[in-house]
Image (cartoon, helix red, strand yellow):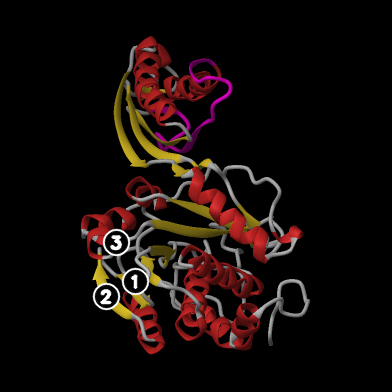
Amino acid sequence: MNIHVDGARPRDDAERLILASIDEFIDIRRDLHQYPELSFHEKRTAGIIAKYLLSYGYEVAEGVGGYGVVATLRRGSGEKRLGIRADIDALPIEEATALAYSSRNPGVMHACGHDGHTTILLAAARYLAEHGRFSGTVTLIFQPAEEVGAGARRMIDDRLFERFPVDAIFGLHNWPGVAAGQLGFVEGPAMASVDKALIRIVGKGGHGASPHETVDPVLASASFITALQSIVARNVDPLEMAVLTVGSIHGGSASNVIPESVELKLTARAYSPAVRDKLEARVPALARAQAESFGAEAEVDYLRGFPPVINHVEETRFARRVAEENFSTDQVASSFRPRTASEDFAYMLQERPGSYLFVGNGDSAPLHSPLYNFNDQIIAPAARYWARLAEAFLS
């Protein structure tokens, strides 16, 4: 098959050697895709990862923070230590691609490309073990439970960085709509924080023919949803980013009955910790005020998710320099905008310096879509990037 992103001849030995075994890694990726596992249930996936890493000659630790796998490879007398992370879990989505290798686990799908991220790092791991020119320690972190925002924190709580010290850590995510294999870098905030609010607006139910005898929580909820965007428009600095999304609203079951209560679920996203704090203060306050203006009450449970991904400047510039020195101009985005999606790699960047980068997935369905498909053409260039980054960092 020998898939290569631009059809050109390999530019160096790393690319040639990775491409020589690319069919094997495409098979690995498609096997992982057929048997996706939800967060905290990645037993099979972790076992496969560990098996390959052991065969490449890595020291392998399993069961780190759940089904996390950490592999280390030491070479030469260098004292520097590099960490590279890939996520391994899938989503509770019913696949609709009809591909020959589509998910065989009903209601579970690799709709975010974690099967691809895992395979990219395995391909890089093999190259580094067999051909890597470096002096120091490579630590490869295969993280479970990213989709629920808990895996990184659990690995850290399991003394990840004490047991496997690193001087810097890097990760990547594929991105649909960006040219296949193109690398993107963002200094500073690269992805948003995400928090959740569960809101119950309680009124007084009654017959729809006698609304004056009720306190209508549906009307209060509608007013709150409309007013919610005033927080973004009037409480947040126009030069900052904030996104408030009501994704669920439920109340009542009949057209002629005013219900007793309405339940809403919303998410709040920001790049700045200060804006994040502002949203946490204003959303509950507005919910209560809007409810009270209708004679209702609002019960608010505001749940902090995970923080924004904030890339360290020096490490991001280094990562970009590696790309510019090893890839053609069109494979490195001249500018790449931050994404408003979220990633629990943020926790790792709070513990160690590093950077989270992006690699284009081409013209595919969006992430978390039942029609999404990871682009196997990007395995080789992304694996080559990890290989070159490791060799540069540990030169």
Residue placed under numbered mark 2 in the picture: 61
The 10 Å Cα crowd at callout 2, few under 14, some 14 to 19, many 20 or more, is some
Q: Are marks 3 and 1 in contact (CB under 8 Å)?
A: no
Residue span colored magenta: 234-258
Mark toward the start of the polypeptide (3 vs 1):
1
Q: Secondary structure at mark 1?
A: loop
Report if residue 37 is visible in the image: no
Q: Is residue 204 left or right of residue 243?
A: left
Q: Is residue 51 above or below residue 232?
A: below
Badge 2 vs badge 1, beta-carbon distance below 8 Å? no
The image shows residue 49, relative to residue 347, as above or below, that is below
Front-lying residue, 232 or 223? 232
Label 2 SS? strand
Read off the residue under disc 1: 42
Cα distance, mark 3 to mark 1?
Answer: 24 Å
Q: In front of the other: label 2 or label 1? A: 2
Q: Nearer the viewer, residue 28 or 134?
A: 134
